[in-house]
Image (cartoon, grey):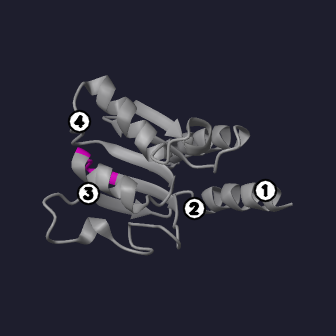
């Protein structure tokens, strides 16, 4: 197992915690030099905060940890392709990389619906790697919504 897969497995554990709390199962962690600086899972329902996505939780924690809103040389691992809101924050924080699990054909901003990271007019370009532990990430979401519908 490589480093990306190992960190994605941690993000999957966070997603499972979110599912247990009744949230859409998405988990994220932010890493610098092999060290986890921030982590989180979706929590917009429990916090009544539409911005409380897993990515936002991880980025906020890492920024507080480093006492800096810029997070260069960091990688965000997230089980679902980030949306436009999260992609915007990723750009502003100057993250070096995003590694995500499964694509999001409805709101994905890394190429599924739009590709914010390839927009040449923007002043920062985060590198993106998708499909790491994609099946496990997708299965968590499928199971969550299947149970929710029944």
Q: Which residue is mark 4?
A: 69
The front one of 26 and 52 is 52
Residue located at (73% from left, 55% from top): 144
- Looking at marks 2 and 1 on the same chain, the residue that comes earlier in the sequence is marked by 2
Q: Secondary structure at mark 1?
A: helix
Residue 91 to residue 138: above or below: above
Q: Secondary structure at mark 2?
A: helix
Q: Position of residue 30 (x, y in %)?
A: 39, 39
- Looking at marks 1 and 3 on the same chain, the residue that comes earlier in the sequence is marked by 3
Q: Position of residue 81 (x, y in %)?
A: 47, 61
- Looking at marks 2 and 3 on the same chain, the residue that comes earlier in the sequence is marked by 3
Dot 2 crowding, Cα within 10 Å, few <14, some 14–19, many 20+: some
Residue 140 to residue 39: above or below: below
Q: Whole-Å distance between the Cαs marked 2 and 4?
A: 29 Å
Q: Secondary structure at mark 3?
A: loop
- On-image quarter of the C terminus: bottom right
User: In the drawing, what numbered circle is on residue 148?
Assistant: 1
**From the viewer's perspective, is 97 left or right of 70?**
right
Residue 30 to residue 128: above or below: above
Q: Is residue 3 visible?
A: no
Q: What stretch of residues is rendered in magenta?
A: 93-97
Dot 1 crowding, Cα within 10 Å, few <14, some 14–19, many 20+: few
Residue located at (38% from left, 62% from top): 84
């Amino acid at each position: 197992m490589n480093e990306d897969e190992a960190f994605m497995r941690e993000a999957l554990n966070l997603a499972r915690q979110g599912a247990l709390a009744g949230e859409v199962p998405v988990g994220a962690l932010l890493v610098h030099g092999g060290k986890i600086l921030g982590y989180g899972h979706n929590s917009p329902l429990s916090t009544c905060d539409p911005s409380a996505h897993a990515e936002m939780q991880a980025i906020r924690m890492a920024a507080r940890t480093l006492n800096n809103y810029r997070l260069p040389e960091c990688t965000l691992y997230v089980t679902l392709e980030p949306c436009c809101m999260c992609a915007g924050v990723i750009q502003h924080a100057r993250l070096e990389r995003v590694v995500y699990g499964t694509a999001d054909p409805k709101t994905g901003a890394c190429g599924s619906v739009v590709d914010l990271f390839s927009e040449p007019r923007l002043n920062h370009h985060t590198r993106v790697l998708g499909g790491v532990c994609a099946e496990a990430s997708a299965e968590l979401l499928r199971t969550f919504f299947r149970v929710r519908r029944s």
